[in-house]
């Protein structure tokens, strides 16, 4: 493990942990780390768990020297969800943001999101919209996510909105900032439905907390023909319906036949749109 002095938390500026689980994160990891290091928030640490990478990630991380950075090098690869869980468990901050190694966050992301949590003490997490880029870094959408969710929203309402929309409306982990006690209480990261791992994990907390939903785009999510989402494209609908069948057994959601029909329609439409995009992106990648 590499690391330096961790800033001490204060009531005004609680320590924030930016955790980055990574396996073979090149060539995008440097951009992700740069965006984390450039936060204008005064107190944060960055925790990277290198899942026995073989593409130069390990060597790149060994050459970094910053007191805000801690790196945990694993000798053996573990499943992705386990690596995400290990990253969370190693966070020492009061607030936690998990980033994937190919995503980025705006310089003021931590400052704005921590202020939102401070002003909404009953909420366990805050979610912002994000920009979406392709594998070449070209912006596809400047603002994406939340789909009408605004302000402090009851967690059960958020789960129902995601189910009816056929997707994760809160966004990838880089879009969120969570209170450490909330996110650590729901570990380990959900691994039964890999494509739904983020929202299925959030949902474990959402039955007992609210979400602050803010439209300001504070993260950038990269979609490429070689991304995890692309690899799982054919399995996405099955995984969503598996998670839906599991969670809608909870009577607190009041899931109805009408809800199920609307969810199926949304899922079919979103799956078709994703397939069209990835086919186009794969062709573009081959041309590049």
Image: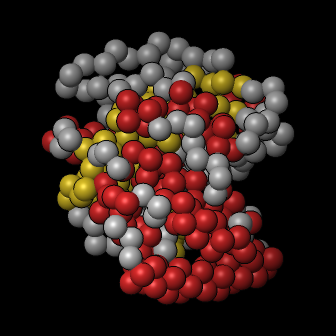
Residue 209 lies, in percent from the top left, at 29, 46
What residue is drawn where x is 36% and y is 50%?
206
The residue at the point 59 percent across, 80 percent down is 271
Residue name at image x 75 percent, y 27 percent: 74
Residue 249 or residue 102, whichever sits in front: 249
Q: Is residue 270 left or right of residue 151?
A: right
Residue 112 visible, this angle: no
The colouring scheme, among rainbow, by chain, secondary structure or one colour, is secondary structure
Q: Residue at x 51, y 18 (%)?
A: 67
Q: Quadrant of the C terminus?
A: bottom right
Vertical placement of residue 14 versus 253, above or below: above
Give residue 285's quadrant in the image.
Answer: bottom right
Percent of width and height locating residue 224:
66, 67
Q: Is residue 272 left or right of residue 37?
A: right
Residue 273, how many percent across, how many down? 57, 84
Q: Residue 167: x, y in percent?
A: 49, 70
Give the camera-side residue of 36 and 235: 235
**66 or 53: nearer the eye?**
53
Quarter the N terminus occupies: top right
């Amino acid at each position: 493990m590499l690391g330096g002095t961790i800033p001490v938390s204060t009531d005004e500026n609680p320590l924030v942990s930016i955790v980055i689980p990574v396996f073979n994160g090149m060539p995008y990891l440097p951009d992700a780390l740069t965006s984390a290091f450039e936060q204008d928030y005064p107190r944060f640490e960055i925790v990277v768990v290198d899942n026995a990478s073989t593409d130069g990630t390990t060597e790149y991380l060994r050459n970094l020297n910053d007191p805000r950075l801690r790196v945990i090098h694993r000798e053996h690869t573990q499943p992705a969800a386990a690596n995400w869980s290990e990253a969370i468990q190693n966070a020492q901050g009061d607030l936690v943001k998990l980033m994937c190694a190919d995503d980025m966050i705006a310089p003021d992301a931590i400052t704005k999101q921590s202020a939102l949590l401070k002003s909404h003490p009953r909420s366990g997490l805050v979610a912002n919209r994000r920009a979406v880029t392709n594998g070449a870094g070209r912006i596809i959408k400047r603002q994406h996510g939340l789909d009408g969710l605004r302000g402090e929203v009851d967690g059960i309402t958020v789960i129902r909105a995601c189910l009816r929309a056929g997707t994760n409306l809160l966004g990838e982990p880089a879009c969120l900032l969570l209170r450490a006690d909330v996110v650590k209480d729901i570990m380990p990261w959900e691994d039964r439905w890999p494509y739904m791992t983020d929202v299925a994990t959030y949902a474990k907390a959402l039955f007992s907390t609210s979400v602050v939903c803010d439209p300001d785009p504070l993260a950038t999510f990269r979609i490429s023909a070689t991304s995890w989402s692309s690899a799982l494209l054919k399995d996405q609908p099955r995984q969503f319906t598996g998670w839906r069948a599991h969670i809608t057994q909870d009577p607190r959601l009041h899931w109805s036949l009408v809800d199920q029909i609307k969810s199926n329609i949304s899922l079919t439409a979103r799956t078709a749109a994703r397939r069209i995009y990835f086919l186009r992106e794969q062709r573009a990648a081959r041309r590049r």
